[in-house]
Image: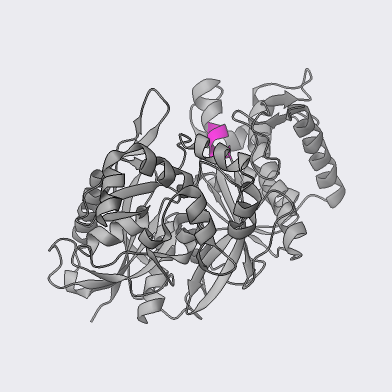
Amino acid sequence: MASYVLGIDQSTQGTKSLLFDGKGSLVARADRPHRQIVSDRAWIEHDAEEIYANVLATVADVVARAAIDKGDIRGVGISNQRETSLVWDVGGAPLARAIVWQDARAEDVCERLRRQGMAELVRVQTGIELSPYFPAAKLAWLMKNVPAVSHALARGELRLGTVDTYLLYRLTGGAAYRTDYSNASRTELFDISHLAWSEELCDAFGVPASVLAEVCDSDAAFGMTDFEGYLDAPIPIHGILGDSHGALFAQGCVRAGMVKATYGTGSSVMMNVGESPVRSGSGLVSSLAWKLNGTVSYVLEGNVNYAGAVITWLKDDLGLIRSADETEALARAAAEGDRSYLVPAFTGLGAPYWDSDATGALVGMTRTTHRAEVVRAALDCIAYQITDVLKAMEADAGLRIGELRVDGGPTHNGYLMQFQSDMARRPVAVSPTEELSGMGAAYAAGCGMGVYDAATLFRGVERRRYVPLRDEGWAQGRYAGWRHAVSKALSD
């Protein structure tokens, strides 16, 4: 009998359902977008009912597209947009729209805690900086500002959490109220050393620990679903991972020192640091990668605000290119001697600088700086920013990076990938697959159910590889120029 595993990737822009065969190969994919609800107060929200409906629809779509027997699907894994926060009642009905991770309306909650001297406790227990970006402040805001939430709490009927918990609850008809370690570690309510909800932080934020979901292994048997009767018999939801964690697992970064970078609008760079947390002194975030097969793994993570978005800026705002496909040829045609640097601090700089007041800069222009040179500088800045994070990771973890595994649209650009390898002084290995978040969750589920063997699952993956071609002196000179350009962009 054929065996298939479903992967559901619920991301910021939409929902994908992915079907993998018994060897872990992608068979079919189906996508549905959802609305981005942005108010005049810059609140960013999603409709939880729309998201749930899209999950059901894409599952039916992908099965139809693959033309398989529904009875051959063994189980499902879920990956999700991290930090987006939801509240619902015991019957599964949303009590408010989901607050998306970019939404900063809860800054007042964080400011109150800073004044109370809580920021250091948050950093020590959770590995992340106090910020409205994370669910703790968002949930505190909802509990204070949405009467239906406080009423549900008083009745003992409140459910809350991240997207994974909401989908699991709905898909199991309320039978499973759980989350996994990767998502729990991003809430700013979870003590990553003691692997438990922090009573101190729950009290500080005003989110009772008693109403939080049970935290389970990432490959646990979370619950059973038939997708509202679509399947003839229920199957197990046997894997849950936050999206970046799912990509890390799908890249096969299962040992300490292994690193992946996802090149999207921004970039998430994540290093597996092993079974003990590493506290960053370089502005990186410490989180849990997952708990699989009973073993916890931790990560260091650095987020770059502008990666693929720089290419979009070239096209939509400057009109220098008509499509991203033009950038590689232009970069290769640029004058070798030009030393222009673009620092894309359009909304400040992320890791490892964390300067929200930094401003963008184009540094080092001369009469040799034309269209091609600006385009090359835009590509180069993506690699420079990721190199910044890699250097910080090696310093914090005391681990040498052997190779950088990469995924995302910009990885198709051969110039950028070669420049990344030259700057990082490490081989760069490009994934042949783009659907890595959902793949990672499906793989975790498949391993948990015994469909896949974790020891052999990642063997034989054919990645396109780039190795450093420029000498180290050249790279050091270019990187020194980048750091000088960044110094011009940083706030005083």
**What colouring does the structure picture have?**
one colour
Vertical arrangement, residue 123 with respect to residue 312, above or below: below
Vertical arrangement, residue 320 with respect to residue 3, above or below: above
Residue 99: give x, y in percent of width and height: 38, 41
Q: Nearer the viewer, residue 303 or 403?
A: 303
Residue 301: give x, y in percent of width and height: 61, 54
Counting the numbered discs, the total is: 0
Magenta-tinted stretch: 305-311
Quadrant of image for the N terminus: bottom left
Q: Nearer the viewer, residue 300 or 127?
A: 127
Quadrant of image for the C terminus: top right
- Residue shown at the point (26%, 42%) measured from the top left: 148
Vertical arrangement, residue 182 with respect to residue 46, above or below: below
Residue 457: give x, y in percent of width and height: 47, 75
Residue 16: give x, y in percent of width and height: 32, 52
Vertical arrangement, residue 357 with respect to residue 146, above or below: above
Splitting the image into 4 quarters, where does residue 214 fall? bottom left
Evaluate whether residue 469 shows in this view: yes
Q: Nearer the viewer, residue 189 or 420?
A: 189
80 left or right, relative to 74: right
